[in-house]
Amino acid sequence: MGIFLTIVTFAGFSLLFLVLTFSFLIVKIYSSKSFRDPSYPPVTGTVFHQLFHFNRLYDYQTEVAKKQPTFRLLAPAKSKIFTTDTRNIEHILKTNFDKYAKGEYNQDIVKDLFGQGIFAVDGEKWKQQRKLASFEFSTRVLRDFSCAAFRRNAAKMVKAVSEFATPDRVFDMQDILMRCTLDSIFKVGFGVDLNCLDGSSKEGKKFIKALDESNAFIYWRYIDPFWKLKRLLNIGCEASLKKNIKVIDDFVHKLISTKRNLLAMQEDCNEKEDILSRFLVASQEDPEKMNDKYLRDIILNFMIAGKDSSANTLSWFFYLLCKNPLIQEKIAQEVGDVTGNQEKEINFDDFAANLTDETLEKMHYLHAALTETLRLYPAVPVDGRNAETDGILPDGYRLRKGDGVFYMAYAMGRMPYIWGEDAEEFRPERWLKNGVFQPESPFKFIAFHAGPRICLGKDFAYRQMKILSMALLRFFRFRLADETKIVTYRTMLTLHMDGGLHLRTISRKN
């Protein structure tokens, strides 16, 4: 009887605590928020609406933005302002760059995964990493090294897909793409052959799983008002996140230690090819500041960006090609025309090895199709800043210091007032003029960010995506395994396809 009474008492106090906490949050949400002030963006709900619509969050945001391009959700601290207005985005990311920052709110949420890396920091740390990374990304050595890695892994991927090239076999294209791009980014980032594509790295598989799960758990923090309490008590998804971060940290620190030892034995080699080696050389000038923990953060940020952006985009790209087979054939024809080997017999390795920069530059329709994919399925569907001062946005709405200001790349790609009445159609031709690719303003096409923080790896991403897609479309035709299945995303920091991309493929005749 005493045990039963103890359980009931504990359950009662727990319920009371939850009720009081929820009541406190409601009071905090609605107090001093000026939700009837017409000069402030109109309120369309509270942060709890994000919980209700979590599994289709970006589509929910799209529906709201079609009616109200700039809107506000009430949160316990400051308001969260969301916008698809290109004038506002230029104002935040460029014109008034110094008045908007990642801020403590965002940094607190992402620091367990991103640490002090370039995507999480502001000020001098950001400037230092940006300057160093900008220099390294501009070097011919790194570009040539990365292209060679992309070509080798493209040939490996074609061989992997060839095993499924019978009408009755189904495979997960997203899984293969994830493993392929992770192999590439590890080679370029760390100078290490991870061999995820052939499945020989158990450590690599464990690392990938931990990385993807951490991505999802970190994003959940933006939605879950109780995440700090869960972290304190080490329960639920916060306990799982902690375990995954340890897997990631152990894996990356081991790589850094190994690479440092290798470099110590190769002091006479001046041409450091991979990014980690180049950062390790730079760290010798300030070893206290650029210690192994800081190097972990720097490298992991670039690795996450390189892996997820290319693999996710290519997954959506092949999904769209399966939904639009005429466009798939048009790109395959362009591959044949540009490489000049439609009728020639050629093996996978030789074809990939001949995909030079000059060849890639001629692929205007492919470039347009990849860009059109990113317009509809941007790698980062929502991104944002914190207002450092009170201000007024170009659309006339004001904001207060501390407000979060988020731009919705996924929703923007579906706005008729930005892209026309056919905004939701996959139409690569919108990017071409007389057959030549024509870029749009980065504040309209925001997939690679814009302003001073525009993505340094943009050219690397396009190069990798072109090489992989050209190799695959040269040798195979693709179709969905189940045309009736609804393919959607998993709500996380990056636009990951939920449940994979299950395809069938047949070989094209050499």
Image: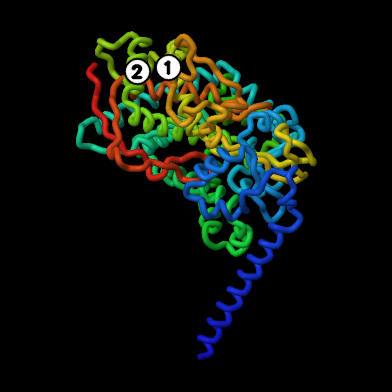
Q: Nearer the viewer, residue 469 or 12?
A: 12
Answer yes or no: is residue 360 visible: yes
Circle 2: residue type: Lys
Name the secondary structure under disc 1: helix
Which of the numbered marks, if any, corresponds to residue 365? 1
Q: Which residue is situated farthest in the bottom direction here?
A: 1
Q: Residue at x 32, y 39 (%)?
A: 502
Q: Horizontal placement of 38 versus 317: left or right?
A: right
Please give the residue where the numbered disc 2 appears in the rendered image: 330
Answer yes or no: is residue 107 visible: no
Q: List x then y, in percent, for residue 348.
A: 31, 20
N-terminal of the pair, mark 2 or mark 1, is 2
Q: Is residue 427 above or below residue 98?
A: above
Name the secondary structure under disc 2: helix
**Category of crowding for the residue at label 1, using alpha-carbon neighbours closer than 10 angstroms: few (below 14), some (14–19), many (at least 20):** many
Q: CA distance from mark 2 to mark 1?
A: 8 Å
Q: Is residue 239 above or below residue 218?
A: below
Circle 1: residue type: Tyr
Q: Residue at x 52, y 45 (%)?
A: 60
**Category of crowding for the residue at label 2, using alpha-carbon neighbours closer than 10 angstroms: few (below 14), some (14–19), many (at least 20):** few
Q: List x then y, in percent, for residue 358.
A: 46, 10
Location of the C terminus by quadrant is top left
Q: Horizontal placement of 280 versus 322: left or right?
A: right
Q: List x then y, in percent, for residue 375.
A: 50, 29
Tag 2 near tag 1, CB within 8 Å: yes
Quarter holding residue 277: top right
Q: How is the image coloured?
A: rainbow
